[in-house]
Amino acid sequence: MPPKQIILQWVDAFNNADINALIGLYDDNAINHQVVSEPVIGKTAIQKMFEQEFAEAKMVCIIENIFEDNDWAILEWKDPLGLRGCGFFQIKNNLIVFQRGYWDQLSFLRMHGLPFPQK
């Protein structure tokens, strides 16, 4: 399956907060590295991350562009509140093995009335 198709499935699951469908798209040893935090390693840890994030805020991903390059897909997105970001997904054997996301954490936290994490 082309990487773009995997990302379309990912966006659908994300927008429905369907953690089971989301996790089904990741390799057991996947790495999800949102650059505003440390990498999350492994399917179980990624599932916990999504559970926590969906419990804290209603998140919606509106696709602006999806680009493909071999086993990579690049997702440019926005949300209804005006936040924008970009995600890079490496796909192998129809599963996400690596994901890196770029977005403005401070704006996200302010929009959702969430506290800024203390280090």
Image (spheres, rainbow, N blue to C red):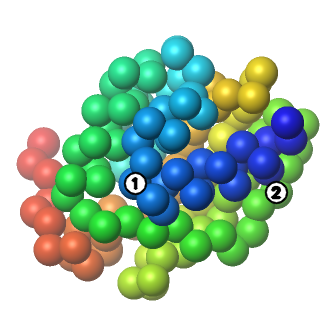
Secondary structure beneath label 2: strand
| Residue at 70% in and 34% down | 90
- The residue that disc 1 covers is 17
The N terminus, quarter of image:
top right
| Residue at 48% in and 54% down | 14
| Residue at 65% in and 49% down | 9
Q: Which residue lies furthest to the top in this view?
A: 29
In the foreground, 22 or 98:
22
| Spot occupied by residue 40 in the image (x, y as percentages of width and height) | 39, 29
In the foreground, 30 or 86:
30
Q: How crowded is mark 1: few (under 14 residues within 10 Å), some or many (20 or more)?
A: some
Identify residue type, mark 2. Phe
Q: Is residue 104 left or right of residue 73?
A: left
Q: Is residue 61 above or below residue 38?
A: below
Identify residue type, mark 1. Ala
- The residue that disc 2 covers is 67
In the foreground, 52 or 33:
52
Secondary structure beneath label 1: loop
